[in-house]
Amino acid sequence: MKRRAIKFLNTLIAALLILSAAIAATGQNKTAQRPEANASSAQASADIKAAEDVHYTYEFKQPQFQVPRILIEHDATGRGRISFERKNMTEAFTEPVQLSSDALKRISLLWDSLRFLDSNTEYQSEKQFPHQGTQLISMQQGARRRTAEFNWTNDHNAFLLVTEYRRIADQALFVFDINIARESDPLGTPRLLKNLDALISRNALSDSHQLVPLLRDLTTDERLPLIARNQAQRLLKRIEK
């Protein structure tokens, strides 16, 4: 009996030693994985900080236009705001803006192609067209900042860049105007939707798919005249094709 007890005790001790070793190994594996997890978290934080550190600005000015000034500001994620003024009005309007992933990709590629902060290129062409308005593009990353101003450019990428920003502005202005009209001037909505139709035809919007929820809402808004609701329905079908 004594031998059996000793044998059982030895077996139990061996099992406990094996279990203890397994627990220790698991702890080591978790410890070994922590640096990788920490590194991944640190990289994600660095990417977010880098996006926050980069700031892009587009500004348009022409005092004689119905919209004499437009200012668009956004970060590397496409989140920002648009400010604009109306002619003969002292108040400036500011609205949040979020670029779609497709629009942000196009704009980011154009900024990269310009190598803007590393360049001293003057984008103004020899010919001057001040009556068409002055455009300013600006980029800031940390302590580095640069602004370029021109009223006409022969630089292909600079031209495409400001064109993208004008598309953002035109889309944002439509959203602002149609929401105001729904509340205070429903009879003016057919004219605004007709203008939207023209913008879509000219490919003059940043991303027409961002307007889908709004257009769906317009189709059922009984404050609007039937012609406006039908227009919204046609535009919705056109965008969703």
Image (cartoon, rainbow, N blue to C red):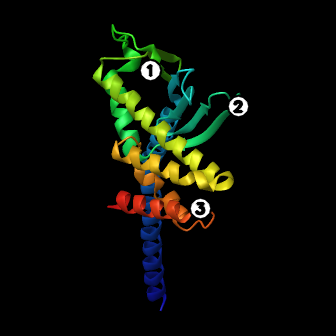
| 2 and 3 marks in contact (CB < 8 Å) | no
Q: Is residue 237 found left or right of 71 in the rendered image? A: left
Q: Which is in the foreground here, disc 2 or disc 1?
A: 1
**Which residue is at the far bottom?**
1
Residue at (43% x, 82% y) in the render: 7
Residue 49 x/y as whole percent: 52, 35
Q: Which mark is residue 132?
A: 1
Residue at (53% x, 21% y) in the render: 62
**Mark 2 or 3, nearer chain start:** 2
Looking at the picture, does residue 173 appear above or below residue 182?
above
User: Would you say residue 8 is visible in this rendering?
Assistant: yes
Q: How many marks?
A: 3
Q: Residues within 10 Å of mark 2 (few under 14, many from 20)?
A: few
Q: Which is in the foreground here, disc 2 or disc 3?
A: 3
Q: Which residue lies under the disc numbered 3? A: 224
**Which residue is at the far top?**
126
- The answer for how far apart the CA atoms under marks 2 and 1 are is 23 Å
Residue 238 x/y as whole percent: 35, 59
Residue at (46% x, 52% y) in the render: 210
Name the residue type under label 2.
Answer: Glu
**Which residue is at the far right?**
90
Residue 168 x/y as whole percent: 46, 38
Residue 89 x/y as whole percent: 68, 30
Q: Which mark is residue 91?
A: 2
| 3 and 1 marks in contact (CB < 8 Å) | no
- The answer for how far apart the CA atoms under marks 3 and 1 are is 35 Å
**Mark 2 or 1, nearer chain start:** 2
Quick one: SS at disc 1? helix
**Mark 3 or 1, nearer chain start:** 1
Name the residue type under label 3.
Answer: Leu
